[in-house]
Image: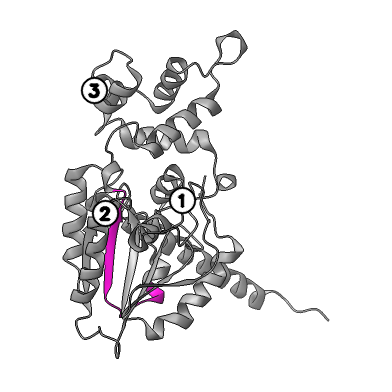
């Protein structure tokens, strides 16, 4: 299955960013700290190329601290880029992003040259919650469904600091399969774009090795972490369902219900602090996906050339 979700309002967001970016000093990209590579939008990077960027790893309270450190180091090593971790509901750390923006654009500030910052990210990454925390009131709508914010909003965080909030945006084609599954597992993708059971199986594939002990702690199967790691994903999903009573008449597994239970436990943090990918893993997945796309393009080009050659070689008609 290929997870893809790009509703119509996301086309409007792309256009709005192109119009706004000319006057922007710093771009803040909100990332999900549980999937920092998969939640980084390549289309946003393309639209805002050349602008200093602050990567905010949000929901870090739900993420694995050791892996968060790896991702912060990864992004901080990139040119014109800073990265910080945040929990959007905490006031003091949230204000750190204002100082970080001034570090990235030290020539901006004051009433003559106010700081102009564009903030973007994937749907359901916690952007609206962060903004509401910053301004101390309900400035934007929030919710646990993807696609709550529908249009750009300008918010004054200070007399000389303007924040332009854009709707959550994915990109038209997610080429990295693992990223598609991770985005779906996090709730960044609309529910009609994926199959819960398939996403739950892929989530278990990512969890069973590094986080087997946390799965056991949550579901209390009586297994060691090593035993969890050796299990097949469908066996683990069955075990989740049986432990949580997700059964059909006759004791058969209700796989759909079991998948929903697992996904909810991941999204709410009930499984403990988890990060689904490391920088090394995501780089490897991306390279493999780009090579696959290049191979497909070469195959299409070869077929088109063969058809053109066959057409030229075909005998004419009288």
| Start-end of magenta stretch | 46-59
Q: Do the residues labelled 3 and 1 touch (CB within 8 Å)?
A: no
Query: Extreme right residue here?
Result: 318
Can residue 85 be seen in this snapshot?
Answer: no
Image quadrant of residue 54? Answer: bottom left
Depth check: give the residue in front, 225 or 12: 12
Q: What residue does disc 3 label?
A: 225
Q: What residue does disc 1 label?
A: 188
Between disc 3 and disc 2, the foreground one is 2
Is 156 rendered above or below residue 1? below
| Residue depicted at 26% across the width and 76% down the height | 52
Indicate left or right for 209 with 11 as reference: left
Q: Could you say where residue 32 lies in the image, as x and y percent from the top left?
A: 34, 52
Is 38 rendered above or below residue 250? below
Label 3 secondary element? helix
Q: Residues within 10 Å of mark 3 (few under 14, many from 20)?
A: some
Q: Could you say where residue 228 lies in the image, as x and y percent from the top left?
A: 29, 22
Q: Mark 3 and mark 2: span between their CA atoms? A: 30 Å
Image quadrant of residue 289? Answer: bottom left
Q: Mark 3 and mark 1: span between their CA atoms? A: 29 Å
Label 2 secondary element? loop
Q: Decide whether residue 57 is among the magenta residues.
A: yes
Q: Could you say where residue 255 lies in the image, as x and y percent from the top left?
A: 53, 25
Q: Earlier in the sequence, mark 3 or mark 2?
A: 2
Q: Residues within 10 Å of mark 2 (few under 14, many from 20)?
A: many
Q: How is the image coloured?
A: one colour
**What numbered label is drawn on residue 99?**
none
Label 1 secondary element? loop
Q: What residue does disc 2 label?
A: 86
Can residue 250 be seen in this snapshot?
Answer: yes
The quadrant of the picture occupied by the C terminus is bottom right
């Amino acid at each position: 299955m290929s997870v893809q979700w790009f509703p119509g309002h996301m086309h409007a967001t792309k256009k709005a960013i192109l119009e706004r970016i000319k006057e922007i000093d710093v771009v803040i990209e909100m990332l999900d700290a549980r999937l920092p590579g998969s939640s980084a939008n390549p289309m946003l990077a393309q639209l805002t190329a050349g602008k200093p960027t602050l990567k905010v790893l949000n929901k870090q309270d739900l993420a694995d601290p050791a892996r968060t450190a790896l991702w912060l180091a990864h992004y901080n090593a990139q040119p014109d880029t800073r990265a910080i971790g945040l929990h959007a509901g905490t006031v003091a750390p949230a204000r750190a992003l204002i100082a970080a923006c001034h570090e990235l654009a030290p020539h901006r500030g004051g009433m003559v040259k106010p700081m102009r910052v564009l903030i973007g990210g994937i749907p359901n990454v916690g952007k609206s919650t962060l903004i509401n925390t910053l301004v101390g009131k309900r400035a934007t709508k929030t919710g646990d469904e993807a696609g709550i914010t529908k249009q750009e909003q300008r918010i004054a965080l200070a007399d000389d600091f303007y924040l332009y909030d854009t709707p959550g945006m994915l990109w038209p084609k997610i080429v990295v399969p693992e990223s598609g599954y991770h985005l779906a597992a996090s709730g960044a993708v609309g529910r009609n774009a994926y199959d819960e059971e398939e996403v739950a199986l892929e989530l278990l594939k990512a969890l069973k090795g590094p986080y087997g002990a946390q799965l056991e702690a949550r579901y209390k199967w009586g297994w060691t972490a090593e035993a969890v790691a050796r299990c097949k994903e469908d066996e683990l999903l069955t075990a989740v369902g049986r432990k949580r009573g997700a059964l059909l008449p006759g004791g058969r597994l209700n796989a759909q219900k079991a998948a929903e239970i697992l996904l909810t436990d991941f999204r709410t943090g009930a499984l403990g602090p988890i990060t689904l990918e490391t920088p090394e893993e995501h780089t490897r997945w991306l390279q493999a996906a780009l090579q696959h796309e290049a191979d497909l393009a070469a195959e299409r080009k070869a077929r088109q050339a063969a058809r053109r050659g066959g057409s030229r070689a075909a005998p004419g008609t009288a």
